[in-house]
Image: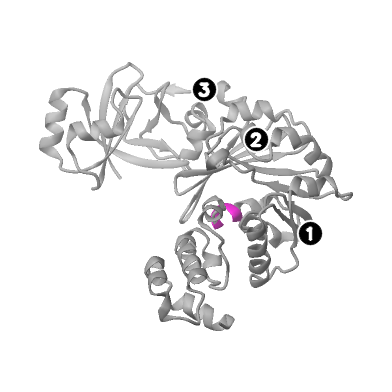
């Protein structure tokens, strides 16, 4: 089957069920339907995740796991800021090649390393189709390849595999492959700058203790969900910068600070609820900038362990969601009765509250959706409140 005919088949059947295509494979004897079905299924998954690759129906996707582990286009584009102009870069854990391809856009020379032959073959095909046939591809251990190089690089990138025996997910850096703790000295001897993608579940304080070479740690979220932690390693650095960045459809929330600034920040606790309620982005919460939000934006925190804030005005650039307070109830059986009488649906979140969100929804028997959001939480005076807000 010619390449053009194959691409036409993949394009024409983009919305079809891959399983049904396989069951009807005898209808297209001239087509490698198994290959086409695999790539059609993959393209459906990357349509919003990697839209610029979706635009190329000729690309190959060898299996679902590499696609699951690949960075999104949004986070790959975010990493481009770490590539010096005209740099010589190396991706030691190439995988599907998404990060390597995006990082190579600003590089003079790029190297891709990968252990699995099927991913190497796909990368070779895809890079050529995407106009970067000049990316040098190396099959085998990226760590071993790097040890054998006499030249140095401007940036080394790696995304250690977070799967253990039996494809079990692992989160500790020392359980990943390669073990970044064991090879960091060698990496920094080969490059002045190392960028590592680690599990979004990793503990930030412990990570900074393990890596005193950290210059920056980036918490990267997409549409409110934390997707990646990025470690930028250079020489030992006394004051690492923590960056919380939430990529949104129409822009981004960005907040940065040094770890020692958080405990020193002056926080004010609310004696009453203001006109507005503020909910920080997930990136901010993961980064741990709780007191600093109060100080920098002039907000009052509801309680030490309640990461919600209030004010009568909206400060410019708050990194999170803003709600208008409609009414509040003390937590009681009477409050539940009044809720059921007055509302039939609303979103809800329980924070620092005796009930979890799911248990609270079951107790209130309110459907989700609508234009209101219920926050069940605890104030600084230990009182339990139900705060009803409008979006």
Q: Which mark is residue 266?
A: 3
Horizontally, is 371 left or right of 129 in the view?
A: left
Q: Which mark is residue 241?
A: 2
Q: Mark 1 Cα within 10 Å, few/some/many (few <14, many 20+)?
A: few
The first of marks 3 and 2 along the sequence is 2
Magenta-highlighted stretch: main secondary structure? helix
Q: Which mark is residue 11?
A: none
Q: Quadrant of residue 25?
A: bottom left
Q: Mark 2 Cα within 10 Å, few/some/many (few <14, many 20+)?
A: some
Range of residues picked out in magenta: 73-77
Residue 357 vs residue 186, the one in the foreground: 186
Mark 2 lies on a secondary structure that is strand
The first of marks 3 and 1 along the sequence is 1
Give the number of the mark in front: 3 or 1: 1
**Is 318 above or below relative to 120?**
above
Query: How is colour applied across the structure in the image?
Result: one colour
Horizontally, is 377 left or right of 107 in the view?
A: left
Q: Quadrant of residue 365?
A: top left
Q: Is residue 87 visible?
A: yes
Query: Residue at point 56% right, 35% down?
Result: 171
Q: Badge 1 is on which residue?
A: 86
Gap between marks 2 and 1, in whole Å? 25 Å
Q: Mark 3 Cα within 10 Å, few/some/many (few <14, many 20+)?
A: few
**Is 335 above or below relative to 188?**
above
The first of marks 2 and 1 along the sequence is 1
Query: Residue at point 21% right, 34% down?
Result: 362
Q: Position of residue 80 (x, y in %)?
A: 66, 54
């Amino acid at each position: 089957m010619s390449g053009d005919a194959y691409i036409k088949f993949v394009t024409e059947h983009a919305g079809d069920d891959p399983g049904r295509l396989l069951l009807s494979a005898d209808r297209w004897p001239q087509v490698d339907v198994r290959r086409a079905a695999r790539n059609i299924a993959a393209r459906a998954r990357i349509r919003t995740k990697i839209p610029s690759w979706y635009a190329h129906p000729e690309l190959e996707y060898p299996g679902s796991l590499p696609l699951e582990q690949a960075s999104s286009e949004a986070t790959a584009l975010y990493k481009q800021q770490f590539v010096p102009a005209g740099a010589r870069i190396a991706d030691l854990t190439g995988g599907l090649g998404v990060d390597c391809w995006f990082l190579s856009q600003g590089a003079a020379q790029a190297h891709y390393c990968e252990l699995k032959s099927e991913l190497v073959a796909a990368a070779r095909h895809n890079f050529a189709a995407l106009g970067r046939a000049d990316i040098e591809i190396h099959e085998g251990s990226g760590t071993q390849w790097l040890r054998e190089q006499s030249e140095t690089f401007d940036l080394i990138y790696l995304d250690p595999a977070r799967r253990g025996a039996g494809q079990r997910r692992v989160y500790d850096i020392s359980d990943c492959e390669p073990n970044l703790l064991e090879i960091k000295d060698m990496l920094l001897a080969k490059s002045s700058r190392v960028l590592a993608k680690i599990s979004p579940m990793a503990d930030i304080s412990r990570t900074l203790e393990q890596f005193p070479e950290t210059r920056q740690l980036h918490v990267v979220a997409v549409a409110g969900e934390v997707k990646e932690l990025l470690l930028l390693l250079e020489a030992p650095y006394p004051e690492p910068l923590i960056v919380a960045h939430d990529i949104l459809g129409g822009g981004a929330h960005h907040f940065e600070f040094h770890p020692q600034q958080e405990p020193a920040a002056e926080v004010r606790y609310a004696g009453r609820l203001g006109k507005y309620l503020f909910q920080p982005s997930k990136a901010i919460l993961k980064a741990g900038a709780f007191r600093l939000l109060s100080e920098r934006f002039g907000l009052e925190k509801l309680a030490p362990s309640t990461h919600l804030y209030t004010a009568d005005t909206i400060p410019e650039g708050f990194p999170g969601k803003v709600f208008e307070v409609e009414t509040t109830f003390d937590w009681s059986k009477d409050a539940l009765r009044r809720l059921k009488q007055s509302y039939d649906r609303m979103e809800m979140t329980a924070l620092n509250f005796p009930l979890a969100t799911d248990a609270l929804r079951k107790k209130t028997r309110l459907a989700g959706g609508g234009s209101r959001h219920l926050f069940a939480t605890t104030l600084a005076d230990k009182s339990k409140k139900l705060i009803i807000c409008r979006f």
